[in-house]
Image (tube, helix red, strand yellow):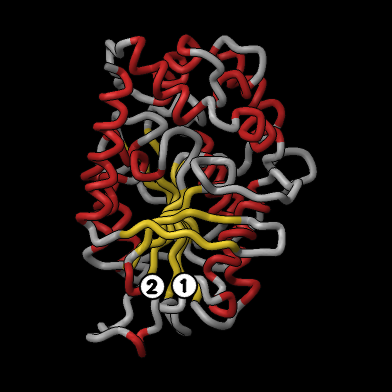
Amino acid sequence: MGFGVVSLLNAVFRHMFTSAGLRPASATVDADDTTIHFWTHPSLLQPSSEQQQPLPPRPVVVLIHGFGPDPTWQWAAQAGPLSRHFDLVVPTLLFFGASSTRAPARSDAFQAAALAALLDGGGGHLPGLGAGRAVHVVGTSYGGLVAYHLARELHRRGGGARAGKVALCDSDACKGTEDDRALAARTGVAEVTELLAPADTRALRRLMAVCAHRPVKYIPECLLRDMLRKYFGDKREDKIALIKGITTGEGFQLAPLPQEVLIIWGEFDQIFPVEKAHKMKEKLGKKATVKVIPNTGHLPQQEDPKLFNQILLDFLLHPATSNGSAAAAAK
């Protein structure tokens, strides 16, 4: 029964991606056999000169997932609305799903470097990503940490695609050791790896309850077992190494980005409390804006996708109308 439900949900989310025009692909981006699996629009997979009816190039949005199930689960509600305006690249990060590497690095900065290599026009992995196209970067939770580094890397490299805007969703790039200790204490674990990389169904229930402001009241044990096997148990030791390899904390200084930044946060996030959104704004400076989504937790893109999509599209589609001062909470 559990396997059937997980497989059905997986099929539903994949269908939402294919209905948005996205197709699965993969690319090996370096000499360490770093292979990234991703979803994208076919127009990015072939040069415009080879397309039968080339369309005017659209800006690109990279959607970067956090810890948890497949990115199709995490971005299902965004694929369709964003695809009406943008070409998408939705990668599966290294050590999630089939994405892998022989390299020893386990940091969010290394994840970003691999994605930058995927997007690099010289690599030929996305030949339809021509020069001058804006590439916006959106990341949730751990994916927001990767998004921050990717944004810096895209700006540093210059040339080819143009670094666009950045949206960081419930992603505490200011966190340090004390924040990890506080999170562990709030959730009743010895260390955060027990929370974010659950080892059994009891730990998975705890994580799901903490992530959602209005968690599902009943989840069958068989469903949790299959979710654990398929999405959490796979490469668990590598995922723990990723958590330990996060580059924030002592010795890391969050610096302003040259791009415009939108910080989206769930009002009742129990992983990263909402006050951290405003601390992020202070660190990122005048080009950063905060939007708080009411009555949501750590996953506002899933708990209130309509409002989340509206806020994100308003940011990506329209030029800045202010000097980047923090906005009031979303109404």
Front-most of 244 and 265?
A: 244
Residue 114 lies, with reference to residue 237, above or below; the image says below
Q: Quadrant of residue 132?
A: bottom left
**Residue at x 27% of width, y 12% of height:** 217
Front-most of 205 and 256?
A: 205
How far from the left and from the top, in percent, is residue 325?
45, 56
The reply, left or right, for residue 82 in relation to residue 31 is left
Front-most of 67 and 317?
A: 67
CA separation in Å, label 1 and label 2: 5 Å
How far from the left and from the top, in percent, is residue 44?
38, 73
Q: Estimate how packed mark 2 is, as few (under 14), some (14 to 19) or many (20 or more) residues with alpha carbons within 10 Å.
A: some
The three-letter amino acid code for the residue at tag 1 is Leu
Q: Quadrant of the C terminus?
A: top left
**Residue at x 40% of width, y 44% of height:** 71
Q: Which residue is mark 2?
A: 44
Q: Secondary structure at mark 1?
A: loop
CB atoms of marks 1 and 2 within 8 Å:
yes
Q: Secondary structure at mark 2?
A: helix
The reply, left or right, for residue 263 in relation to residue 113 is left
Outermost residue, bottom direction? 49
Q: Which residue is mark 1?
A: 126
